[in-house]
Image (cartoon, grey):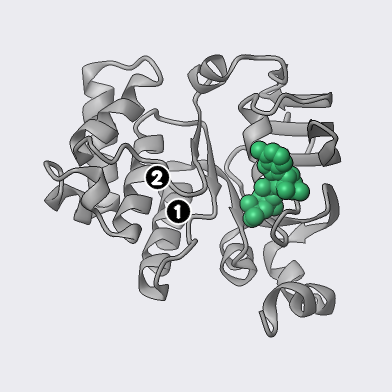
Amino acid sequence: AGATPLLAIRGLRAAYGKIEALKGIDLEIQAGEIVALIGANGAGKSTLMMTIFGRPRARAGQILFDGQDISSMPTHEVARLRIAQSPEGRRIFPRMTVAENLQMGADATPGSKAERAASLDRVLKLFPRLQERMTQRGGTLSGGEQQMLAIGRALMSRPRLLLLDEPSLGLAPLITRQIFSAIRALNNEDHLTVLIVEQNANHALRLAHRGYVMVNGLITMSGEGMELLQRPEIRAAYLEGG
Ligand code: ATP
């Protein structure tokens, strides 16, 4: 306690025309934490993540990264601060090879040859499947492999903060477990700080140190991951029968 959070969001508002997607969000992430953001479809989770990158722009409030307000910063400058994201729907480059996709991630931030080689090594250790498919086009990978590639590409920029939007979306349980175990390893072994948006509240809250629940553009609950998972209102809304 008392340390400057790696990310601090205060009173954040954002909108698409007249649709208010974020209505005053407060959220903090300490360095070394995994924080989960859960909530139903349309709650505003993706918008929160995208607003960190300046699209859409914050209409009010602050986004402090390491104490610096980045809420008016252009997207490419945010990336240079080594905030990386794996967006919803993955958005890899389908016509480029796996190797080229990973290279694009490294190009987002400056880094020496040795640093690039070390990042690539790490990514391929985490996701050995990608090693086998380096010369294959991204578009020919399975859904799970594309998700691995999207995360791998984000890791190539040597992020200080990794934002993951629905990494388990549409994936088989076995692949989901592999992805979540890679995220845990990145946090445990590399001390990577992670914000993960998930509709799979069960997985996300087990993985995360802390979680926030978002409803209709507002944070309605927060707490330790396992503690949130025990709450009857969370179980009723996000776990049972869903
Ligand atoms: P999902 O899991 O479906 O992505 P979410 O919690 O991430 O849901 P958002 O995608 O952030 O929610 O959407 C929040 C609100 O903003 C919704 O009402 C949505 O319809 C609206 N919205 C999102 N993107 C746009 C857009 N490009 N233009 C207009 N409205 C949008």
* Residue denoted by label 1: 183
Q: Which of labels 2 and 1 is toward the front?
A: 2
Compared across the picture, whether 160 is left or right of 221 comes to left
Q: Are marks 2 and 1 in contact (CB under 8 Å)?
A: yes
Q: Nearer the viewer, residue 209 or 198?
A: 198
Beta carbon of the mark 2 residue lies under 8 A of ligand 1: no
Q: Position of residue 57 (x, y in %)?
A: 72, 24
**Residue 232 found in image quarter:** bottom right
Compared across the picture, whether 104 is left or right of 28 comes to left
Q: Position of residue 42 (x, y in %)?
A: 72, 54
Identify the image quadrant of the C terminus.
bottom right
Q: Position of residue 207 (x, y in %)?
A: 56, 62
Beta carbon of the mark 1 residue lies under 8 A of ligand 1: no
Q: Residue at x 48, y 61 (%)?
A: 168
Amino acid type, residue under disc 1 in the picture: Ile
Q: Residue at x 40, y 59 (%)?
A: 179
Q: Nearer the viewer, residue 76 or 32?
A: 76
* Residue denoted by label 2: 151
Q: Give the label on residue 173, or none.
A: none
Instruction: Name which of mark 2 and mark 1 comes first in the sequence.
Output: 2
Q: Residue at x 52, y 48 (%)?
A: 88
